[in-house]
Image (cartoon, helix red, strand yellow):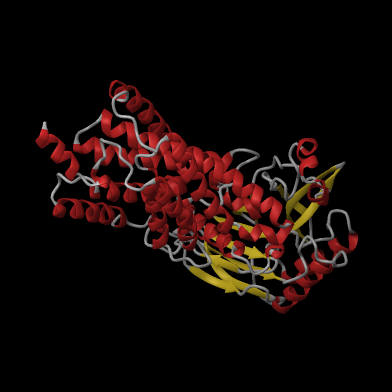
Amino acid sequence: MRSLHRRSDRLRPIDALVDRRPPLPLWLAAVVAIAAGPVLDAGFPDRGVWPLTFVGIALVLLTLMGRSIGGALLVGFLAGESFYLIHIEWATAYLGPVPWAALSTLEAIFFALGAVLITLSYRWVPRAFPGIGGRVWLTAAVVAALWTARETLVSTWPYGGFPWARMALSQSESPFAPLVAWIGFSGLSFLMVLLVALALQLAATAELPTVSRVGTAVLAVIAVLVVPAWPTATTGSMRVAAIQGNGPAGYFDAAAPGTVMQTQIDETLQVLDADVDVVVWPEGSADLDPQRVPQSAAALDALSRRMDAPFVVGAISQRGDRYYNSSLLWDASDGVRDVYDKKHPVPFGEYVPDRKFWEPFAPDLIGLIQREYTPGTKDNVFDIDGVLAGISICFDIADDQLTRDAVAGGARIVFAQTNNADFGQTDENQQQLAIARLRAIESARSVVNISTVGTSQIIGPDGSTIDSIPAFRPGSMVSEVPLTDTVTPSMAFGHQLETFIGGMGLASLVLAGFAARPRRISNRPRT
């Protein structure tokens, strides 16, 4: 007995995978959790030091090992709050600190609930499956799957979700970016957390030789990175002119109606003699709706006729008593040839869900949002003289399903129209641009990301930058843009993979919980 006690005493806290002893006391775990937020954020644009995302994930997981449920809720909430408060600080530029703090706190609550599941997996899986495979590989896989399941949930719920801060979105410029064509955003998040969780489990498995632990971790990273980029053979090209007028397009800009459209017209006149197949303007660029204002229609007609090309323009459409954030396909001969209405207006930005419930909490802020945009029901593909183009309006680019819908509808290129004017010089612009770059790689489609104020870019199907316009400068991009019609595995099976990852994580946790149940009574975790 004495020898057994001595052996137990020699175990380092981080080695106690089965004993479930926390490697960090609660006070230190709370400090590390708070520090993890800025580290995670630094991996995303605009700092964009992508390896720091892996460091941040490691810090979060380390705080959750061996925790009680209450301890996991605390450190999970602290990590989530410190991350979101920094990551979406740009929200204060639009409506001030209250919505920013409210959204950050809501996301932190979800983060904390996900942290509890991860803590339970650290508690149950090694005890249910005490072999090396269970303690190392299965535990890491379940942790990664549960992290990804939480990301999936908050990306779609409530009110359409908030998919802005998924771990995959930090990797648009990293060697891991090509993986999204194979496994999508959720799959990449899963692999990122899996590699980190695996490294931590290997570090804690003292009975394995150091060489084996280090070698396994290195080989796992190499195995992921050697996956080749999805082949993006082109099937033609389209000559595109994309116009950034740099007009006063912000919600609180005191500009006369038509001012934004005039800046777009002025900049389009600079490329009037360009030989192009289509001209793309940003979201809200035709601030005088050409469907209702004859002067606006006449201006577009004149430009379209002179350039002998259709225009894709953003406008606010009104049908009856309903308003839509719309993209119009316009040409001089037919006027409006097609319309796409934004399917997911931004809650508390473009409309107020359950207004009667929320208004008493912040009547002044809620009162600012007077125009309620109605979700669209039309497909998000335009036929532009035989070339099918997917249409994305601002926040649409963060919605996995809308990209899949466009590709399934035959889109060979994507026009991502946006208006970043409300967010000034914050990180929001660069974060959205990173999402657009990953969408290009994921779908193997060129993405024309055109903003009212920038940064605007034309991105090739491999994620390379074809052309760009700096932020807050008027300019144009006139480029021959590759077309593709290949269907990547992510576009074909991404949703099924996402469902499998989440289902596998939850099912494994439940199974491990039942299997580990007889051992729980005598070995309760410390706080």
Residue at screen point 32% across, 50% down: 195
Residue 414 lies in quadrant: bottom right
Q: Is residue 468 left or right of residue 368?
A: left
Q: Depth check: 451 or 232 in front?
A: 451
Which quadrant of the figure contains the N terminus? Answer: top left
Residue at the extreme front of the image, as rendered: 2
Residue at screen point 87% across, 64% down: 257
Q: Residue 172 in the image: state x and y as whole percent.
A: 46, 61
Q: Residue 492 in the image: state x and y as whole percent.
A: 45, 42
Q: Is residue 444 visible?
A: no
Residue 342 in the image: above or below residue 279: above
Q: Is residue 508 left or right of residue 251?
A: left
Q: Is residue 225 left or right of residue 70?
A: left
Residue 504 lies in quadrant: top left
Q: Residue 55 in the image: state x and y as whole percent.
A: 38, 58
Q: Depth check: 431 or 412 in front?
A: 431
Residue at screen point 77% across, 35% down: 357
Q: Residue 234 in the image: state x and y as whole percent.
A: 46, 60
Q: Depth check: 366 or 220 in front?
A: 366
Q: Count up the numbered dots.
A: 0
Which quadrant of the figure contains the C terminus? Answer: top left
Q: Is residue 211 visible?
A: yes
